[in-house]
C-alpha cells in the first residue's frame, strides 16, 4: 500500500492513497494510530504502565503461530467452547501450577480477553447498578473507571506496608454489604505493597463469614524481582469466595488480549450460560491456540526471565535516581516486583499544579488522586518503569527533580 503524506488545515497530517478504481482516499493521521499511546515528542511519560515496544516478543509469536498453523487444524478458527479451549486450559494450568507454586486445575480456569474483561464480566454477571463494592485506597485507576461505568457504589479501604488493613475491613463490613472486594494483593498498582500471608488468610475467612467475593487482580503475581510473594489468593480459598484475575498482558503482550479467571468451577455457570458466550462462543479461541503453542514450546519461561531481569534493573536504577535527585520530604519504597513506584510528597503538595509545570518540562506521570475513590491522595505520584530504558528513566527523574526544586 503506497501512502502519500501531506499536511493541511492547522497542522493536521493526512495520507493520500489511490484505490483500484483510481479513486483518491484520504486518511487522517490520528485515525491511523495503532497503539493506545500518543506521547508528545520529547516527553518522558512515567504514567505509562505498559511494556516498551522493544519488549514485545514478535519472534516468539511467529514461532508459536507457525507451530499452531502447521498442524492444519482449523478448529481454532471455529466458535470456541464457552470456558475456553480445553487443551489451552490444560497447558495454562500446568504453567500456572509451576509459576504460582500451588496446584491449578484446568476446570478452575475460564479464558477471557484480559484481566479488564474478566473484571467487566464479573461486574456484569455478579452485580447490579447501585450495589456496593469495596476497593483498596489507593486502587488501580482504570478499575475505578470501570466501576463508575457500572454505577457501583465504591467504598475505599486503607492499606499499609502489608496491604489491606483487615481490622478496618471488618469495621466496614458491619456498615455495608459489599458484593465483592476488588483487591490487587501482589505488587499493588499503584502502591506496590503485597498483602501478607497472614492477612490473606484472615481476608478469606471474613469473605466466608460476611458472604462477599474477593476479586483478586493478580496480573503482577509472576513479576517478582527481589522476593517470593505469598501464593495467589486461590491458595487460601476454601468455599469459592475468590475469583482471581490473570493476564498475558504483562508477561507476554497486551495486544493479545488474553487472560483468565481462576475460581471454583461452579462460579463459572453464570458466565458460560450468558447470552454473550452462548452467542459468541468462548473468548479469543484463535489467540488461545497460538499462546497454547507458546506454552507447549516452553517459550514463555525464558521470556519471563528476560523481562524480570530488565524490570529488576529498571526498578533498581529508578530507585537509585530518585534517591539521588529528589529533595528531602519525598518518600518511597523500592518495589519488589510489578511495574510501579509510588511517591509520597509532603501533605500540602498539590499534584495537579505540579503536573502542569512538569509537562512544560517534558515529563509526566499519573497523579495520586486518580487512584483514589474519594478524590484524595493529592500528595502522591505514580511512576512506572516498564516503558522506558534506564537512561530515559534517569533523565525523567532529573527533570522531575528540577521542577520540584523550583517550588
Ligand atoms: C492491576 C491491573 N489490572 C489489570 C490491568 C489490565 O490488564 P489486561 O491488559 O489484562 O486487561 C492492569 C494494567 O495496567 C493492571 O495494572
Image (cartoon, helix red, strand yellow):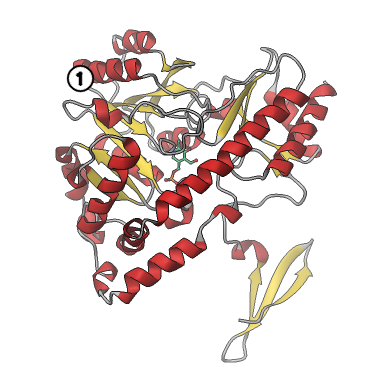
Q: Residue at x 26, y 74 (%)?
A: 74
Q: Quadrant of ligand 1?
A: top left
Q: State left or right for residue 385 relative to residue 213.
A: right
Q: Is residue 46 above or below residue 163?
A: below
Q: Where is residue 269 shown, x and y percent of the image?
A: 16, 44
How many discs appear? 1
Looking at the image, is 36 positioned above or below residue 312? below
Tag 1 secondary structure:
helix
Identify the image quadrant of residue 399.
top right
For mark 1, what is the residue?
Answer: 208
**Residue projecting furthest to the bottom:** 21
Q: Position of residue 60 (x, y in %)?
A: 46, 61
Q: Position of residue 205 (x, y in %)?
A: 23, 17
Out of 174 and 35, give the one closest to the viewer: 35
Q: Nearer the viewer, residue 173 or 53?
A: 53
Residue that appears at 39% across and 33% down: 151
Q: Is residue 124 visible?
A: no
Crowdedness near tag 1: few (<14), some (14–19) or many (≥20) residues, C-alpha within 10 Å: some
Q: Is residue 204 above or below residue 44?
A: above
Asked whether the viewer can see residue 173, the reply is yes
In which quadrant of the rendered image does the C terminus lie?
top right
Q: Nearer the viewer, residue 249 or 228?
A: 228
Q: Is residue 110 above or below residue 355?
A: below
Quarter of the rendering containing residue 66: bottom left
Across and down, in percent, residue 139 comes to: 47, 27
Query: Considering the image in quadrants, where does the N terminus appear?
Result: bottom right
Residue depicted at x 40% and y 13%: 165
Seen from this angle, which residue lies furthest right?
Answer: 406
Amino acid at each position: 500500500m503506497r501512502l502519500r503524506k501531506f499536511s493541511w488545515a492547522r497542522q493536521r497530517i493526512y495520507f493520500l492513497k489511490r484505490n483500484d478504481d483510481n479513486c483518491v482516499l484520504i486518511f487522517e493521521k490520528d485515525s491511523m494510530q495503532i497503539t493506545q499511546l500518543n506521547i508528545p515528542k520529547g516527553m518522558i511519560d512515567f504514567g505509562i504502565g505498559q511494556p516498551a515496544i522493544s519488549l514485545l516478543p514478535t519472534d516468539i509469536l511467529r514461532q508459536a503461530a507457525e507451530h499452531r498453523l502447521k498442524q492444519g487444524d482449523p478448529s481454532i478458527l471455529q466458535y470456541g467452547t464457552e470456558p475456553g479451549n480445553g487443551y489451552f486450559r490444560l497447558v495454562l494450568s500446568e504453567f500456572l501450577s509451576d509459576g504460582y507454586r500451588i496446584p491449578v486445575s484446568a476446570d478452575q480456569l475460564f479464558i477471557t480477553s484480559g484481566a479488564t474483561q474478566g473484571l467487566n464480566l464479573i461486574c456484569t454477571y455478579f452485580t447490579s447498578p447501585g450495589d456496593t463494592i469495596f476497593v483498596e485506597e489507593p486502587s488501580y485507576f482504570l478499575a475505578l473507571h470501570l466501576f463508575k461505568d457500572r454505577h457501583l457504589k465504591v467504598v475505599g479501604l486503607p492499606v499499609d506496608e502489608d496491604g489491606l488493613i483487615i481490622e478496618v475491613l471488618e469495621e466496614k463490613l458491619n456498615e455495608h454489604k459489599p458484593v465483592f472486594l476488588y483487591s490487587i494483593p501482589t505488587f499493588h498498582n499503584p502502591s506496590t505493597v503485597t498483602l501478607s500471608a497472614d492477612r490473606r488468610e484472615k481476608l478469606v475467612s471474613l469473605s466466608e463469614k460476611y458472604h462477599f467475593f474477593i476479586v483478586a487482580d493478580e496480573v503482577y503475581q509472576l513479576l517478582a524481582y527481589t522476593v517470593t510473594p505469598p501464593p495467589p489468593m486461590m491458595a487460601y480459598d476454601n468455599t469459592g469466595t475468590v475469583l482471581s484475575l490473570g493476564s498475558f498482558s504483562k508477561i507476554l503482550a497486551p495486544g493479545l488480549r488474553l487472560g483468565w479467571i481462576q475460581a471454583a468451577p461452579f462460579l463459572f455457570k453464570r458466565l458460560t450460560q450468558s447470552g454473550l458466550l452462548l452467542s459468541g462462543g468462548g473468548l479469543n479461541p484463535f489467540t488461545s491456540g497460538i499462546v497454547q503453542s507458546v506454552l507447549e514450546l516452553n517459550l514463555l519461561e525464558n521470556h519471563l526471565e528476560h523481562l524480570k531481569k530488565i524490570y529488576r534493573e529498571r526498578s533498581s536504577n529508578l530507585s537509585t535516581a530518585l534517591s539521588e535527585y529528589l529533595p528531602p520530604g519525598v518518600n518511597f519504597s523500592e518495589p519488589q516486583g510489578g511495574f510501579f513506584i509510588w511517591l509520597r510528597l509532603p501533605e500540602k503538595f498539590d499534584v495537579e499544579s505540579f503536573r502542569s509545570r512538569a509537562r512544560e518540562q517534558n515529563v509526566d506521570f499519573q497523579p495520586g488522586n486518580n487512584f483514589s475513590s474519594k478524590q484524595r491522595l493529592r500528595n502522591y505520584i505514580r511512576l512506572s518503569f516498564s516503558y522506558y530504558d534506564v537512561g530515559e528513566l534517569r533523565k525523567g527523574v532529573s527533570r522531575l527533580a528540577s521542577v520540584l526544586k523550583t517550588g
